[in-house]
Structures are given as structure tokens and as C-alpha cells.
Image (cartoon, rainbow, N blue to C red):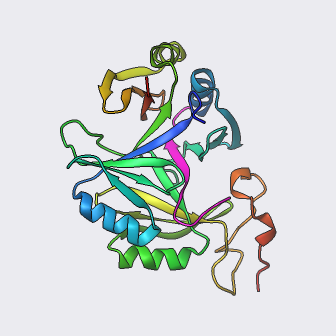
Amino acid sequence: MREDGKIDYVEFPGADLSEVKRFYGAAFGWTFQDYGPAYVAFEGAGVDGGFDADRAEGVAKPMVVLFAHDLEAMLERIRGAGGVITRPILGFPGGRRFHFRDPSGNELGVWSET
Amino acid sequence: MRVDGQIAFVEFPGRDLGQMRRFYGAAFGWVSEHQRHDYVAFRGNDVEGGFSANPSQGPVEPLVVFYASDLETVRARVQLAGGEITRDIFAIPGGRRFQFRDPGENEVAVWSDTCPPPPPTASTCRVGSAFWRPWTARRERSHVAA
């Protein structure tokens, strides 16, 4: 079951997705699911995640994504605790997400299915 | 249970560790614990993790760490598959790890709580460090220097 504020997903930038799939499949036995030409999700890696080949919209470096049932409430809680919202809530196929920066400058994501 | 090749750990750079504990506690309810003056471990996630305030030891950006029961074999497999070793095997409290660059230019790491093939020495294998709880699940595997 998914829980609020827990690490749920790890997203990596990926350039050549077929090369990335070949590498992680050969080295670690991960399995993959394509979502269009610019995104591949992986499974069997302990935590779900994906490789994003979209240079314009995708992440610039590995991003840890937390889960929230109520995205707006979580955004306010992060602001209240001193986090800085770096990317406002936006929709993607399957849900919505936003990004924030923690007090040490790490950028993380939060996503929700609703 | 730890499984070979799975994501086991996420390590974040941290500056003010007290502030990091307060923030992640307040915003997400993460439970954290100071393990050294420059390191805080957090729990309560499916993945373990930590904040490191030591720039020479810790990562400069979030670092995803995979598990390997046999570090030397996985290093060979990573190289064979085209990964580039950026930091060869080094000792960490509770185990050993190496870092590599994948074909997407991501730097990631692999760690193990097991010792290399015998004879292990105290200087290269310090499994079971008392103040590093998340890494000591296999404390019983500690080897005695030959």
C-alpha cells in the first residue's frame, strides 16, 4: 500500500533508452515497460522507477519521488516545514506531481494518482 | 530481505543535519537518527537512506545505491555490460561499495555487507560497525582477519 511521504519512485535521466534497458537488464536483471518513445519504466528493482529521455521536460539528475494521497495538502505541509516549491503541480499520464527543494538544496518530487 | 541488483539505499547530500531531520520529520514523518557527527540515517521508507554532511565521503547529488551479495562479481558484470567504474571498491562503515556511471550518464553505487573472498583483512572489510545500524543486518557475517 502506498503511504504519504514515503519514497515511492526513482526517476533517472536517460539518453538512449534501448541502451539503458540493455545495461540494467544485463547487469541487474531489471525488467522494463515502454511508455512512448521517451520514457521507460523499470520493475523488479526494489523500488519502482523510470528513465526519462525528454531533455526539455525530464529530470536533470536522479530524482527521488515521494507519494501523497492529497497533493495540495502535502504541498502546503512542505512549504510550512521550510521547503521551496521548484515546479508547481502538473499533470502527467497517470497522475499529478510537483517538485520541491529541501533545506540542503536537494530537489525531490511528490506525486499522487488523484 | 536484500536482493542482488535491487535499489537498497538512497543517500542525499546534507549541509545542516539538524535542519534536515526537522524538515523530513515535519513534512513526511520520517524517523531519523544521528549515527555519526556527519551522518544521519532515516527509516520508515521501503528503501533505507541517509543524509551525509561529509563532502569527501558523501555524494554531491542524490545517490541511488543497489545491493550486491558479491561485490566483485557485480563489479565485473557492470563493466562487462558497459558501465564505467568512477570510484572503485572502498570501505564504508558496515560494508564496502563502488560507484559507476551508467550509459545514461547517471552515477550510481553498489554496496555489499559481505567481505571479499578470503583472506579478508580488518582494513578492507569492516562489516558490522556498531554505529551503523541499517547496514548491520548481517552482522553475524563479520569475518576475523586471517
**Is residue A90 left or right of A64 when viewed as pictured?**
left
Number of numbered callouts drawn: 0
Of residues A56 and B26, the one nearer the viewer is A56
Q: Is residue A56 above or below residue B59?
A: above
Residue A65 drawn at (x, y percent): 45, 36
Q: Residue drawn at (55%, 65%), measured in percent from left and top?
A: B97
Of residues B92 and A78, the one nearer the viewer is A78
Q: What residue range appears in magenta?
A: B1-16
Q: Is residue B103 above or below residue A91?
A: below
Of residues A111 and B143, the one nearer the viewer is A111
Q: Residue drawn at (71%, 53%), measured in percent from left and top?
A: B132
Looking at the rendering, which quadrant does residue B128 occupy?
A: bottom right
Q: Residue drawn at (34%, 68%), measured in percent from left and top?
A: A23
Residue B126 drawn at (x, y percent): 70, 68
Q: Is residue B135 above or below residue B52?
A: below
Q: Residue drawn at (29%, 58%), measured in percent from left and top?
A: B105
Residue B145 included in the magenta stretch of the image: no
Which quadrant is the N terminus of chain A positioned in?
top right
Which quadrant is the C terminus of chain A positioned in?
top left
Residue A9 drawn at (x, y percent): 46, 42
